Amino acid sequence: MEWTLAEWGEAVRGGLEGDLAFVRGVETNRLRARDGDASIERTQRAFSVLRRGADGRWRFARGMTRFRPAPPSSSRLKPA
């Protein structure tokens, strides 16, 4: 099965110090089967570090993501 990937995000906070910058936010990744039968979407917290090169261009240096926890299911909730 072949898949296509779409990514988008929303920056919540950023900062700049010399030749390093960071951005923190939320990103969403969607994998969709090319035949249209299946799709998977994940939203996660994201943190990226960028570095300015000698040519003045900003490049991705490091990044990390963390999936948001799923809400508790009613079967795991205990009465008070």
Image (cartoon, helix red, strand yellow):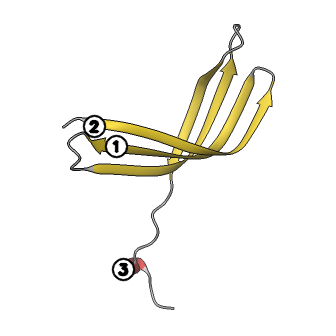
Residue 18 location, quadrant:
top right
Q: Indicate the secondary structure of the residue bearing disc 2.
A: strand
> How far separated are the C-alphas under marks 1 and 3?
29 Å
The crowd level at tag 1 (other Cα within 10 Å; few <14, some 14-19, many 20+) is: some
Residue, far right: 18
Residue 72 location, quadrant:
bottom left
Q: Indicate the secondary structure of the residue bearing disc 1.
A: strand
Residue 68 in picture, x, y percent from top left: 51, 56
Residue at 67% across / 15% down in the picture? 57
Residue at 39% across / 50% down in the picture? 41
Of mark 2 and mark 3, the one earlier in the sequence is: 2
Residue at 24% across / 39% down in the picture? 34
Residue receiving disc 3: 75
Number of the front mark, 1 or 3: 1
Residue 22 location, quadrant:
top right
Q: What amino acid type is highlighted by mark number 1?
A: Leu
Q: Indicate the secondary structure of the residue bearing disc 3.
A: helix
State left or right for residue 19 relative to residue 7: right
Are the residues tagged 2 and 3 within 8 Å (C-beta)? no
Of mark 2 and mark 1, the one earlier in the sequence is: 2
State left or right for residue 74 relative to residue 54: left
Residue 38 in picture, x, y percent from top left: 25, 50
Residue 5 in picture, x, y percent from top left: 37, 37
Residue at 30% across / 44% down in the picture? 32
Q: Is residue 26 above or below residue 49?
A: below
> How far separated are the C-alphas under marks 2 and 3?
34 Å
Residue receiving disc 2: 3
Q: What amino acid type is highlighted by mark number 3?
A: Ser
